[in-house]
Amino acid sequence: MPEYCVTGGTGFIAAYIIRSLLEKGDTVRTTVRDPENVKKVGYLLEMKGAHDRLKLMKADLMLWYAYAKTIAEKDAWSVAKESGINLVVVNPSYVVGPLLAPQPTSTLQMILAYVTGAVEEYPNTTVGFVHIDDVVAAHILAMEKKEAAGRLICSSTVAHWSEVIHMLKSKYPSYPYVDKCSSRKGDNNPHSMDSSKILQLGLPPLKTLEQMFDDCITSFQEKGFL
């Protein structure tokens, strides 16, 4: 069976990709900051197939997240061009879905903070959202489909945070949501994101905004965060 390398194994997307690959019977090597920290990596080792087919490698790849992602992709394209490598990059929007790790990662921490009123305001931002299941499936297609090439956008619904909070309030009204929207302007422009390339590779129809946030809130409830 194939063997894959997944960097940043305790990250939201990476952990789900690892689980998916293990379930397919593949072997996975993943990087983590401290392989001996059972609190952080224990849930990875408990995944089905992990005992025989998952190896944790010590590496600290952390920089400022958005900057690191941008620089890493630029460097990757440069190396690929020089080496003749067929590089395929999946570019997801804001990823939402159920919590897999014991504690929420940064993306889900933000959602939890808006639901519990732990912050004074939510961002005046219009962004694309996508379900974690769709992001994982997109990565698998990018790795396995020979015709995959270039940058593949993976995004379902574009919405303003106010729309998301209104949707959640109507369905889960008992929580003390943050009410105030930031006055900062510039990131709230309506836009669209074209996921046609990854859909043409065989990705099933993308899950809706309601589905991804329902799964997220349900997992918070099940794990005792709500």
Image (cartoon, rainbow, N blue to C red):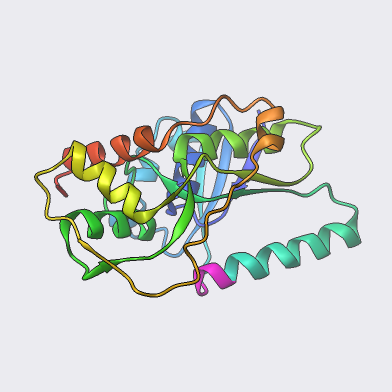
Establish if 120 lies above or below 215: below
Image location of residue 98, percent across then percent down: 33, 40
Write the residue at 64% across / 67% down: 70
Q: Is residue 6 left or right of residue 112?
A: right
Q: Is residue 121 above or below residue 111?
A: below
- How far across and how far down the image is residue 194, in percent? 65, 43
Residue found at x 71% / y 32%? 144
In depth, the one of 173 and 73 nearer the eye is: 173
Left or right, residue 171 beside residue 124: left
* Magenta range: 63-67
Residue 59's spot in the image, x, y percent? Answer: 53, 65
Whether 66 is among the magenta residues is: yes
- Which of the 4 quarters of the picture holds residue 47? top left
Q: Is residue 75 magenta?
A: no
- In-front residue for pair 119/71: 119
Q: Main secondary structure of the magenta part?
A: helix
Percent coordinates x, y for residue 16 in the rendering: 46, 40
Q: Identify the residue shown where x is 57% and y is 72%.
A: 67
In front of the other: 122 or 4: 122
